[in-house]
Amino acid sequence: MAEILVFSEKDDLALELVSKGREFGAALNMGLAAALLGDGASARADNYFAYGADRVYVAEHPALADFHAETFAEALVQIAQQNDAQVLLLASTKRGKELAPRLAQKLGAGCVTDATAVEVQDGNLLVSRYALGGNTVASELIKTPHKVIAVMPKTFELGAKEARQGQVVQVDLDLREPRTRIVERREKAGEAVNLEEAEVLVCIGRGLEKREDLGIIEELARALGAEIGCTKTLCTDYQWLSEDRLVGLSGKKTSPRLAISIGISGQIQYTVGIRGARITVAINKDSNAPIFALSDYGIVGDLYQVVPKLLEALQAA
Amino acid sequence: MNIVVCLKQIPDLQQIRIKDRKPLLEGAPLIFGDMDKSALEEAVRIKEKTEGTKVTALAMGRAKLKDGIKEALAIGADEAVLLIDPALADSDTFGTARALAKAIEKIGEYDLILCGEGSTDNYSGQVGPRLAEILDLPQITYVRELTIEDHRLKAVRNMEESFEVVEAGLPALVTVAAEINQPRLASLRDILKAARKPVQEWRAADLGLSEGEVGAKGAVMEVVSNLAPEQARKQVVFQGDLDEVVVNLVNALTKEGVLGR
């Protein structure tokens, strides 16, 4: 029986794929398996069964000790070929996203990265992703026998955990030593944030004049119980905020119940990141800024006047 | 040292108009993507530091590329190879990587292939890793700092949770993040000088590729639709006295049930 093979270096994301993979497996008449690679892999298998995997392939080959896309791609190809895996579902993390095309190329396969939706259509999988800088959503079918799909985190919900058993298969792989070597890992400064899980988001852009002024944005965020997000300019160019706060095409695609964009003109590269918000609000001094067309509510005004007033109104409410 | 930089011309995303949810690309000028420009800038910086380095700009696209490539030559590429052929048009990442790989093999000597970590339009990040696989090269992606010494590279990669410092021997394929550098603007003098730099144009047949292997006919993907998502925002803009405006906003948000924890 052909299989769907799930892999992510992050178990929580792999389990989202496993949860949804059961549905795909039933519709496509394929089994559902997952691959666990690297040291201590076999100890992690139980959760995969609990969320729906029939089999878990475990490889603890020394070449898999660190993540190297080339080596991991080779490992997954060997597992896929030994077990007739036709659909390979990965999580579109940075590692997943560099792994997917290398893996696809080895399999002579079509591939979609950063998938935002996957649905069964006529015995194939219809995969959607943003295109043209977020101006459009492209829905595509992969025409090759093997299909590699890297899915954005949180696209699928984690299913219910059940008391299920599965089969752990130790696989024997023929891998060469990685040609890249990791010599150091420098931790990023700042506390970890997860914008994808935020219920309320306050996003700040170029309208903020200096780093010290982040204080008023932080105050507003505190009053709203919000996380702070930002545009590429603020985190990549100015480095005022860490990159895990980047919202948009090259950052996080969020789905809060409320997203407030402050001092952000509304270029598509940013707005893609708040498209999933239930309610959007814009505060911008330029009444012609495109952000207003993408907002449910807007205030035209200088953020340095509007934000303190808004804070007062929130505290009074 | 020989460096090949892969560049993709894309429509200027700020100038794409949407009509009936369909993107209108006709009027949009073609530009190189941000990360592609950073890849080129990085190649030129390596050249400035390392004597005997040659930078070849490689791009696939339509006839307009002949104009666009002048920018890359003015910034500092020594020569350019353009892949222009109707048979190559509408290649997906599979066909693009295949054509670029053939061209790189035809260019012959290379130590370093530089690409952007993704194109600014589709950002799929596929061509670099696919190219590395076809050419059997190690891939080092998301690079924000790159140094080359004694035919080895050291790169700082920007990963989600950390900066990862990686070493590899050459030849290798590196994809760069936009933050690796601030691409220079070409001076008028550079632009004039660029006109004298060699530009070669190759067609699919020059690469030993037949029509079914690349272009629309060689595509492994079928695009079923490509439309702007439906936007249904309320677009209520509160106007007037600021004290009232903020209260109106708070009231509206309260009514929507999106305030409070």
Image: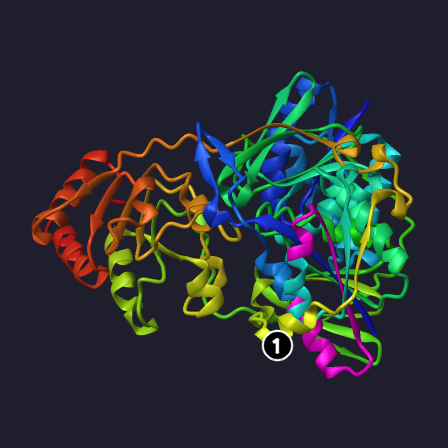
- Closer to us: A142 or B36: B36
What is the number of callouts on the image?
Answer: 1
At horizontal 79% and vertical 56% (from top left) the residue drawn is A64
**Magenta stretch: residue B53 in it?**
yes
**In the depicted structure, whether residue A272 falls above or below residue B81:** above
- Determine the residue located farthest toward the top in the rendered image: A122
Would you say B223 lies left or right of B112 here? left
Q: Which residues are magenta?
A: B40-67
At horizontal 31% and vertical 34% (from top left) the residue drawn is B233
**In the depicted structure, whether residue A48 falls above or below residue B133:** above
Would you say B182 lies left or right of B75 here? left
Q: Position of residue A308 (x, y in %)?
A: 17, 61
**Magenta stretch: residue A98 in it?**
no
- Mark yes or no: residue B172 visible: yes
Pointer 1 chain: B
Judging from the image, the colouring scheme is: rainbow
Quadrant where the N terminus of chain B sits is bottom right
At horizontal 59% and vertical 65% (from top left) the residue drawn is B162
Q: Which amino acid, by three-letter code, is at mark 1?
A: Arg
Residue B261 position by quadrant: top left
Q: Position of residue A138 (x, y in %)?
A: 57, 33
Q: Position of residue A79 (x, y in %)?
A: 84, 40
SS at badge 1 = helix
* Residue named by callout 1: B189
Q: Position of residue A280 (x, y in %)?
A: 31, 42
